[in-house]
Image (cartoon, grey):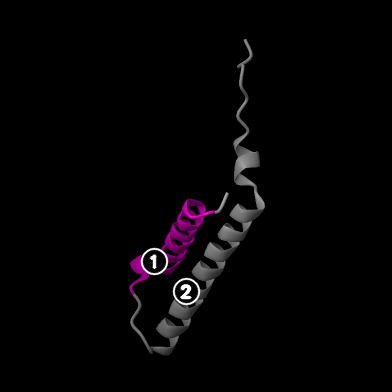
């Protein structure tokens, strides 16, 4: 028996806005990891590798909050 409604999650995830958000998060993660790696090798900063994902999470929170505010005050 076929389901009545077919939900296509890939088409909902694979939008232009989501691609930009994912690229931004990956870039932020790459930059923070490279900064931490270079700082660790040069001995400039002692890096706790457990908190290396915090900058990418902060970028995601900023994007979510700004999108929510923009949608709330959008002129119709």
For image coordinates 51% across by 69% down, the residue present is: 28
Residue 43, given in percent of the width and then of the height, sits at: 38, 88
**Between 7 and 72, which is closer to the camera in this rendering?**
72
Q: Is residue 51 magenta?
A: yes
- Provide the residue designation for mark 1: 54
Q: Residues within 10 Å of mark 1 (few under 14, many from 20)?
A: few
Identify the magenta region. 48-74
C-alpha gap between disc 1 and disc 2: 9 Å
Query: Seen in the image, is 55 located left or right of residue 24?
Result: left
For image coordinates 64% across by 14% down, the residue present is: 2
**Between 66 and 7, which is closer to the camera in this rendering?**
66
Magenta stretch, main secondary structure class:
helix
- Provide the residue designation for mark 2: 32
Q: Is residue 57 magenta?
A: yes
Residue 39, given in percent of the width and then of the height, sits at: 43, 84
Task: Report which quarter residue 50 is drawn in.
Answer: bottom left
Q: Are marks 1 and 2 in contact (CB under 8 Å)?
A: yes
């Amino acid at each position: 028996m076929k389901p009545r409604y077919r939900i296509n999650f890939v088409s909902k995830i694979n939008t232009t806005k989501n691609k930009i958000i994912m690229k931004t998060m990956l870039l932020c993660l790459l930059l923070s990891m490279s900064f931490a790696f270079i700082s660790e090798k040069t001995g400039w900063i002692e890096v706790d590798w457990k908190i290396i994902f915090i900058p990418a999470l902060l970028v995601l929170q900023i994007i979510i909050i700004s999108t929510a505010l923009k949608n709330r005050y959008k002129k119709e």
